Structures are given as C-alpha cells and as structure tokens.
Image (spheres, rainbow, N blue to C red):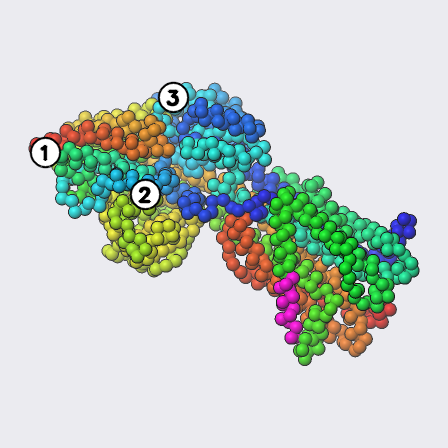
Amino acid sequence: MRFVLRMAVRELRASWRRLVFFFACIAVGVGTIVALRSVVQSARAVLGQEARSFMAADVIVHSSRSWTPDVLATLDRELAAHQVTARTESVETPTMARPADPGSQLARVVELRAVQAAYPFYGTVELQGGQPYAYALLARQGALVGPELLTALDVRVGDAIVIGSETFHIRGVITREPGRVAGAFSLGPRVMIADADLPATGLLGFGSRASYEMLLEVPPASIDPLVTALRRDFANQFISVRSYRSSQDRVGRDFQRAENYLSLVGLVVVVLGGIGVSSVMRVFIHQKLRSIAILKCLGARTRQIFAVYLLQVCLLGLTGSLLGVGMAAGAVAAVPRWTGGADSLFAGVTWGLTPGAVGQGVVIGLLVSVLFSLVPLLDVRHARPASILRDEPAAHRRDWLAAGTIGGVAAALVALAVWQAGSLRVGLVVCGAFAAAALALYLMGRLLIRLVRPLAESRWFALRHAVLHLVRPGHQTNVILLAVGLGAFFVIGVRSVQTSLLHELTVQVSQRDPDMFLIDVQGDQVAGVTALLAERSSGASAVRVIPVLQARVTGVKGRRVDLRGYGDVRREGALGREYTITYRDRLEPNERILAGRFWQGPSATPEVSIEQSIHDRFHVDVGDTMQFDVLGRTIEAKVTSIRSVDFRDTRNGGFMFVFRPGLFDTAPHTYVVPLKGPQAPAARAALQHRLAVAFPNVTAIDVQQILNEVRSVLSKVTLAISIVGLLVLGSGTLILIGAVAVTKFQRIYEAAILKTLGASTRTVAAILVLEYGVLGTIAGAVGALGAVGLTWGLSRWAIDIPWQGPTLLHLAGLLLTATLVAVIGVLASADVLRRKPLATLRAE
Amino acid sequence: MRSVQGRATGRGEPWRIRDRRSGGLAALGLLLVLAACGRGADRRPVSPPEADRQASAPAPSTATADSRPRIVILGDSLTAGHGLPSVDEAYPAVLQQKIDRAGYDFEVINAGVSGDTTAGGLSRLNWSLQGDVRILVVALGGNDGLRGVPAAEMERNLSAIIETAQSRGIAVLLAGMEAPPNYGPVYTAQFREVFRHLASRDHVAFLPFLLQGVAGVAALNQPDGIHPTAAGAQIVAGNVWRVLQPMLAAAKTR
C-alpha cells in the first residue's frame, strides 16, 4: 500500500507541469456543470415565483356562477385529497361607482374585486407612493382603486364612493395587482374591496353577472394531479381550472417552454462536461502506458499498477473538480454584473452555487474520470511490456473482465443520467438518444473521412500527410471527432433552440403593441376620435382605425365543398358562427399570402381573402364562391386568396375574412381603434375621461396593466434564457479547446521525426493546420447537421416552437468549429514546432 | 425534467389550435365580439343532422326574393342567436313560425348584430330598413348595459331610432332590457326608466323586458349566463309574440 501511495505521489510530482493542463480541462468540465446548473436552478426558481405571482396562486378554480353546495363539497374532497395548504376566495363583477357626494352626476364602470385576507398567496399588491398593502386597508368599507377612477369621478384618496348600496372610503391607489388575468382586459378601473363588505352592496343577486375564483396554494407535486382531478370532476359545469404553469394562457405556455429549455440545457451541460473530462482522461492514461510497461518489466504486479493509476486518476479528478467548483463560484458571482446588478429584472435574486449542483458536479467529475480511465487501464493487464514499449497495437482477445467493465461503465453512465434527469424514464430516453446521436455522429465521421481520403493522393506534401494522419490506424481521429462533433452538436443545437425561443418571445413582448382599444366607434365619430387622439396632449400613438362588421357564412360553392344554404353550413359547425370581418387593400405585416393573389385597390366586384384555418378546416379554396349574410343582406364573394395570419403578433389583429374595399362602403359598420395610450396613469386617465365625455357610446378597453405584467414576466424569461445560452456557448467552447489541445501530446513525436527528416517548421505547421482544419470541418459539419435534427425534434416534441430549418447560425457554427479546431490545434502545438527535434526524441 | 420529452399540449385538434391562437391575441379578437360573449359558438357541440332537419325553418336572411311585407328586428347578439348552433334557433326564426302558423303574411328579417349597441343600431338603421318594412322591433340596449353606457346616451339613440322609423310610417315595437343587478340600484333604475319613458310616447308598442322568464334561469341560458339557449329563445319569442300579435291583427284590418 505504501508503494502505491509513494508511486502515485512521485508520478504526480514528476509531471506536474503537464498535469496543470489536465487539471484545467477537468476543472472547465466540472465548472461548467456546477455553474450552469446553479444558474439554471436560480433562474427556474425566479421564473416559477414570477409565474405564480402572475396568478397570485398555484391553482385557480374559476366559476361563472356562485359556488353551489355540490361544487363546494367536491372541492373540499379534492383539496383534502391533494394536500392543498391554503385557499381563499375572490369575486369579480363589473359595476358602477359614483362619488358619495350627492351633488355629483359622475359615474364610471369599474371592475370590482372582493378579496379575503389571505389574498395574494404570491406577489404583492403595489400601491402608489410606495404605500405598503395590507388587508387592513380594505377592512370595514375600505377600497383600493385604479388611478383612472380618481380622474373619472373627480375624487381623491380619502374620499368616499358609492358602490351598489354601500359607501366605501378610498384608502389607496393600485399600481400593480397580482392575479389579474381572468378577463385579460377590463371595461374600467379596478376597485378592490373586502369580501366581507360585498353582501352589503347588494350587487350579487338573481341575474347578476360575476365571476368567482378559488385561489389555492398547493404543494408542487400535487399541482398537476389536482388540476387533472378537478377538470374531470367539473367537466361541463361552468367551472374552469388552471395552474400557474398550465399551457392554456400564453404566460404559462412561455414559462413552460423556458422551463423545458433550461432543463434541457442542464442535461446537455452534463454531457458536455463529461466529454471534456473523458477526453482528458483518455489522453492521460495513454501517456502513462509507457511508464506502466516499464513498471511491469520491473516486476510490478497488475494489481499494484492498477492501484497506482487509479489513485492518480482519483486525485486528479477530485482536485480538478474542486478547482472547477471554485471557477464556477467565480463565474456565478459575475452573473449579476451582466444582468445589471440591483436595478435589473433579477434584483433580489441570490445567485450562488446550489449545494445540489456542487455535489453533482464533483461526483460527475470523479465518476467520469474513473469510468473513462478504467477501460484503457484494463487493456494494460494483458499487454506484454515489450509490445507496449515498441508501440505495437495490443492483440485483440476476448476479455470478459473488460467487457464486464465496459458494461458496468455504461450502466453507471446511465444511472448518472437518470439521476441528473430526476426520472428513470427520461434518463433512459436521454441515454438512448445520446447513444444514437453518438453512433450517428460516429458513422457520419467515418463517412466524411472516407470522402476526404482521395486527398491523400494529393501532390501537395502537407495535405497528403495531413490526410494520411487522419486515416492512419492508431490515430485518434474517431475519438476526437466524436468529442468535438458532439460538443459542436450540443452548442449549436442549444444555440439554435435559444434563437427560436427568443424570436418567439420578442414577438410577444414588443413594446409597440396597442394597449388600449376603443370599440363601437361609429362612422360619423371616426373623424372626431382620430382628431382627439392626434392632439399632442392626448399622448396617444400608433392609432389605427379598423372597420369591422359582423357576418355569417350562409353558403359555399366550390370544387371540394358545396354548401347550399344555411343548413349545410351549419353542419360544418363553427363555420356557421358570426365572424367579425373587415376590409382593406393591403396585407398587414403579420399576414402572408399562401395561395392566390391579394387585390390592389377597391373594386365593386366582391372578393374575399380567407385565413388558412378556414381553408384547412372547411376545404374552402381559391376560386370558390362564398355566400355571406352581412347585417341581413346576402353577399356573394369570390375567394381570391388564402392568407396565414401570425396570431401572436397582436399589433395588427387577426381576421378570418378580409374583403376587398368597395363592397361595404355604404354598409353600416363600426370601427375598432387600437392605440398605444400614454404610459403615465394620470395622462391615461385623462385621455379616457375626455373620450368618455366626448363619445359616450365609445368604450375604451384598457389592457395596459395586463400587457405590462406579461412583458415583465417574459423579459425575465428572455434574460434567463440568454444568460444560460451565453454560459453554454462560453463553456462549450472552453471544453472543445481542452479536448483538442490535449491531443497535442501525440503530435510531439511525429513533428520531431518529420523535422529530423528535413521538414521545415512551416511544412509541419501547414500539416497541422490542414489536419486540424479537416478534422474541425468534419466535426463542425457533423455537429451542425446534428443540431438541425436536434432542433427539429425538440421544437416538434419538447418545446413547442416553430422549426426554422437550417439557418446561417448552423453554417456559422460549422465554420467557427473548423476555425477554432485548426487554430487551437496549431497554437497548442506551438512548443512542438519551436522545440529542437533532438530534445523531443530524447525525452521520449 | 418530465418535460424534456413530454409532448406539448393542445396539438392535433384544430378546434383547440384556433382557440389557443386567438387566446394569444391580447384582446382584439375577443373584443370584436361583444365583450362578454367570448367565442362560445366554437365550443358548442355540433347538432346532429337529424336535429337539423327538424329545425330547418326557412332561413330568413337568404329569402331575398320574398315579396311579403317585412318585420325587421333590430337587435344584438340575443337576436342574432349568438352561441346557438344555428340562427334558425334564435327567437326571430321562432317568431316567423308563429306568424306563419297564425296565418299572417309577413317576413321576419333578423337584423341582429352581436355586440351592437344602441349607437350602432342607429347607424345601421337605414341599411336595415330596406324593402317594404311595416314593423320595426327594437331590441337593443343589452350591450349598452353591459358596458355601462350612460342612460342618457342610450335614450338619445333609441329615441332617434323610433323617430326615424315612425317618420317613414313604420310601426315600432320597443323591447325593453334590464341592466344586470350587479351594476347597482341607481344604474339599473335609470336604465329601466329609459325604456318606460320612450314607451310612453304615442304609437310605440312596448314589451317591458325581452328576456322575461329567461334571464337568470341557468337552464335557459348558455354557459356564459347571458345568451338564451334554444329553449330560452322559444320563451323570448313568446314574449315578443304577445305584443306583436295585436299589431299584426291591427295591420291586417287596416
């Protein structure tokens, strides 16, 4: 035992210079795992918190009718069965608010919300002037109101307002309210009161319209089962159930996508780190084979040799891993600086290493080190010292122990993945996919190498030699190709998923979205409304006027469908409903023509352009004639184009049917005016008030608050994804550099021989550039192709985003990989080039 | 982690995709229909063909060649039959059946537009009063109530509608609406008073509440709590018929 220890220490001491490099490579691999997993965990926690405060609860049960004893009994049963920790009720109803002053004639539609003391479970109600929210503000006829109400009713904080038959005192102004998603838009400002005061208003009675919500606080593991159970219980009962991560609303969906992306990155990073560590270990053992042979000649027993090197591997792995943890701590500490410190979106988040991530990183570093050195070490057992010393490849023979070890290593790796993924199924699937990807990459690498083989006939010495190096037996081409190819594959893949994801999000958080809609604007009011909005003082921008009419499809005459009259249309289901239609003579930026041609200019001949979904669902095609009932008159219009509408782009709205102008000029219709109102609450309230006075029939629907909430959540999602993406790129590159640079030790001997035989330093350098360049190009191509496939699969099965196909990004990834590999290969061998050949040959 | 290979929800079923997409529309898609109406029509099951055939009364709007004198119903989604599988189940179609059965020779024109207010009704009055219109049924105000439009504004519009029709020699039936009680006693009283006041004029037949016996009864309303079901529409048609029938009788003897 003492021999083993002494031997290990001696060896380490003798080659510490070389070992520093190995340390660094292991540290980068482990550091990547630790840093990224920590950041991913922090980001997920932030996003989860954010998505919850968006809803104010984990799960919300919503009913358009008051809770009946039956419903409550079912709720009680399910809530008890799923360990729901807390519940609170909230009621919302539109109503009228007036000043308590009997002399005032003012009144305003408001969205009344009555809450209980436990509201909100997540997030906080923010009040103007930094006033802290407490339920006590609402208790005993207190009210918190939206800023617009003060202007509309000409009241101030401290004044009294009447709602129903009860008088309330305004005790604060709401600037932000968690859980305001139900209707997604509002007819008027919010008024929040205590649930206990609601009965006294007398508003809720026979025929009242109100929505009832039950907010629930649920342990994370019970959320999905509870939602499933409740949905089953309340099918067809005016009751809907959603959780903060349900995919029905868009924030929930985006949150889910970001979650999936982050967990994906967490897994990929382990693979990347593992590649880094394993390629280092492989070279390390390879380097030691000579010493092992000498030890064998001197009579060392296999068991002793084994112990010596395993101990070294363990020491190396452990110290490298610890160094990696230190590096990760530094990297993670720097994250707040990128995100903008205290003012950033992530203010208040503690970025630090999570113990789980540290533990996993170190264990992975150690395990991967041991696992990947075991197999080459086992080979040594049977090898005759002489053959090793002569550098002959070992004769192959059946070795059950080696086979068993390989099996064990594979099983351990699978176990590692299962542990990382946190689920047996996912772990197995990931391993399977990984093995398949590795195999595919390997085969592709072999194919590409075969393709470059003819270059070995080249008359250019450097190229000939470079290619010969690649295809020579004993060369590690395949292994390097696999490591670099896999690395490039993951980095490019993650990068392109990120690009698609961010593209999706930017569409949604666009600052140019309209945040106010004026509806029911009559034809003779358009001029007045636009004039008012055009005034500088109004603060409105991006004003558009969209004519709208209601129409029903009453017939279709076409090649694939023939619906004569309303009875036929009705059988097509939704086609028979009322559609809101418009007319214009240009396409919106969010529309694309798929078939036919879009008209130019007005015409008296009726033409209609239909949305893709109408074409897909009802088989209406270009050239068909559709019959519409518009305000009691029948109109026949020819379908001249099929459009696709990007419904995520809310700026331009989406219409199933767009008509050619000319037909409806004389038809009565109303206008919808989307606009971006002033952002300051006072100016906004003033604008709405002016509109209400001048055009009493026009209703202004304000979506500013909800849009701001959505933007706030989505910008955090965006930032989190970008940070993680950047980290993957950075650390992935470092790992690749390590994997390539470590191969330089094989080049030393060759370079020395070539130089001895008369090759100039330039020739050797050219050989190296070409060799690594070809290798890099092949690896990059393998990676880029793999990434295209990966993103296709992911966007189809896992993250639910539109697939964009091969892009510039993939090409750039390929070129960058090639350049990087060539540059690193040459730089790492710089000392080989400079060194005198004799010194190298002697050292060997 | 379950999600790495967990398939995204909501794929495959065209119904859902449409709904999901329009849910993404911050507001416009929703708003264009009456604020509270939603897209109920899409989610309702399609009625089987048998039921269709039984209920297939002549579709009022397609019968353009009809030369009978007309009864125009100027209304909102209640008249348009929002959320019903077919406009044939809305109360104007039921009314047509009653008229036919009673032997009167009138064609009912459904001029109901979902989301329409009294202001919208006034703007499109001339468009709707095409042909030989004898009776105008004014069934508006529901959306004004849901949006809290000031009562005075509503009265101005309704008054102008009635005057225009009467100046053209068209008899008017005014169907009243109620604002839901959650708008508070003051507003609901003002709202009711608008109809009472207008009805006290000369030559206006008056039905105090169009949804009498239907509003607030869960079984007669769709899940949104606003729009009557087909059974509810039968009752609404009965309400209108009680006031309309004497007008028809008078028109016949004239």
Quadrant in which the C terminus of chain A appears: bottom right
Subunit that carries the residue with mark 3: A
- Identified at 27% across, 26% down, the residue is B212
Q: Residues within 10 Å of mark 3 (few under 14, many from 20)?
A: some
Lateral position of residue A702 relative to residue B70, left or right: right
| Residues at marks 3 and 2, CA–CA distance in whole angstroms | 36 Å
What main secondary structure does the magenta stretch of the protein show?
helix
Which stretch appears magenta? A442-455
Residue at image coords 56%, 57%: A789
Front in this rendered view, residue A536 or B56: B56
Q: Which residue has dot 1 on it?
A: B252
**Front residue of A396 and B121:** A396
Callout count: 3
Residue that extends furthest to the bottom in the rendered view of this protein: A459
Question: Which residue shows up at 73% across the image and 68% down it?
Answer: A473
Q: Position of residue A655 (x, y in %)?
A: 36, 48
The answer for which chain carries disc 1 is B
Q: Residue A551 versus residue A536: which sits nearer the camera? A: A551
Q: Which mark is residue A577?
A: 2
Compare residues A40 and A269 and report the one nearer the observer: A269
Q: Give how far across and how far down residue A215 sits, in percent.
A: 50, 30
Say which amino acid is labelled 2. Answer: Arg
Query: Are callouts 3 and 2 both on one chain?
Result: yes
Lateral position of residue A461 relative to residue A346, left or right? right
| Label 2 element class | loop
Q: Quadrant of residue A688?
A: top left
